[in-house]
Image (cartoon, grey):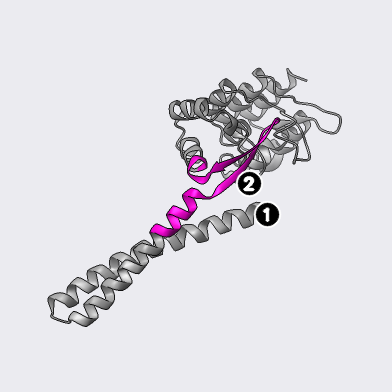
């Protein structure tokens, strides 16, 4: 499902770009034909350019007025896509100042999830972004939130940390970095669980650091850090 969502996003993105590029090409070629006195051909190209711009504008207006459902522990809220776009923009550009102001205006967006049914806090953790993690905490998020994780197999935020961080390209299998350690430390210091009935983060991390066939100092530092919270 996650793959299909990402694929659909890229298809729409490419089509949008092709529409606006086509409009520009038709306009330029039309001007060239007009200069050479090929009036009819120029008019046809201008019309095609206008139709492309019309389709692009119509799609943008439609998209901005589309509604997305955001579920909170107490309500179900319909949110315009334009609001969701702002959220994603501030998140992806790591603009904590604007995100903080945004969440003050739309506090329920702290529950807005990505394609993995994770909120701002967990997603920022997967991206090794401690500044945005702090912003999420400041606006009511917390680790191991059972509501955020209601559609996941596990309640614990750290359970899928290694898998999704690697999937997103922020870490490499078995290679521990300072930024990764800082992210895990931040999560642990702010209450993220490391063990449950069917899961143990230390055991998961121990297997993960062996993926590159080397146990480095950074690997040991990570494991020792997790061990303190068992």
Secondary structure state at the residue bearing disc 2: loop
Q: Which residue is mark 2?
A: 115
Q: Is residue 28 shown left or right of residue 52?
A: left
Q: Are marks 2 and 1 in contact (CB under 8 Å)?
A: yes
Figure check: 117 above or below 138: below
Q: Position of residue 35 (x, y in %)?
A: 13, 75
Q: Position of residue 151 (x, y in %)?
A: 75, 41
Q: Is residue 88 magenta?
A: no
Q: Is residue 140 shown left or right of residue 145?
A: left
Tell me where residue 227 sits by quadrant.
top right
Q: Nearer the viewer, residue 58 or 200?
A: 58
Q: CA distance from mark 2 to mark 1?
A: 8 Å
Q: Nearer the viewer, residue 211 or 156?
A: 156
Secondary structure state at the residue bearing disc 1: loop
Q: Which residue is drawn at the image coordinates 71% and 23% (left, top)?
A: 226
Q: Which residue is mark 1?
A: 1
Q: Which residue is drawn at the image coordinates 50% and 37% (left, top)?
A: 87
Q: Position of residue 65 (x, y in %)?
A: 49, 49
Figure check: 189 above or below 55: above
Q: Is residue 31 shown left or right of residue 56?
A: left
Tell me where residue 193 sits by quadrant.
top right
Q: Position of residue 168 (x, y in %)?
A: 58, 44
Q: Nearer the viewer, residue 76 or 119?
A: 76
The N terminus lies in which quarter of the figure? bottom right
Q: Residues within 10 Å of mark 2 (few under 14, many from 20)?
A: few
Residue 138 visible, this angle: yes
Sequence-first disc among 2 and 1: 1
Residue 214 visible, this angle: no
Magenta stretch in the rendered image: 57-84
Tell me where residue 209 sits by quadrant.
top right
């Amino acid at each position: 499902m996650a793959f299909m969502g990402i694929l659909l996003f890229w298809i729409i993105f490419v089509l949008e770009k092709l529409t606006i590029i086509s409009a520009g090409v038709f306009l330029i070629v039309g001007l060239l034909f007009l200069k050479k006195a090929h009036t009819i051909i120029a008019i046809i190209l201008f019309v095609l350019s206008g139709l492309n711009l019309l389709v692009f504008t119509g799609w943008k207006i439609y998209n901005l007025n589309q509604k997305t459902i955001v579920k909170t522990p107490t309500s179900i809220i319909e949110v315009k896509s334009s609001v969701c776009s702002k959220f994603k923009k501030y998140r992806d550009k790591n603009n904590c100042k604007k995100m903080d102001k945004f969440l003050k205006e739309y506090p329920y967006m702290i529950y807005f999830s990505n394609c993995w049914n994770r909120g701002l806090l967990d997603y920022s953790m997967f991206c090794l972004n401690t500044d945005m993690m702090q912003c999420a905490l400041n606006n009511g998020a917390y680790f191991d939130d059972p509501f955020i994780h209601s559609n996941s197999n596990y309640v614990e935020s750290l359970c899928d940390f290694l898998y999704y961080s690697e999937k997103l390209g922020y870490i490499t299998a078995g290679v521990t970095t300072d930024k990764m350690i800082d992210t895990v430390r931040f999560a642990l210091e702010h209450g993220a669980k490391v063990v449950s009935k069917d899961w143990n983060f230390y055991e998961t991390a121990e297997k993960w650091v062996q993926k590159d066939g080397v146990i480095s100092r950074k690997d040991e530092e990570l494991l020792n850090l997790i061990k303190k919270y068992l």
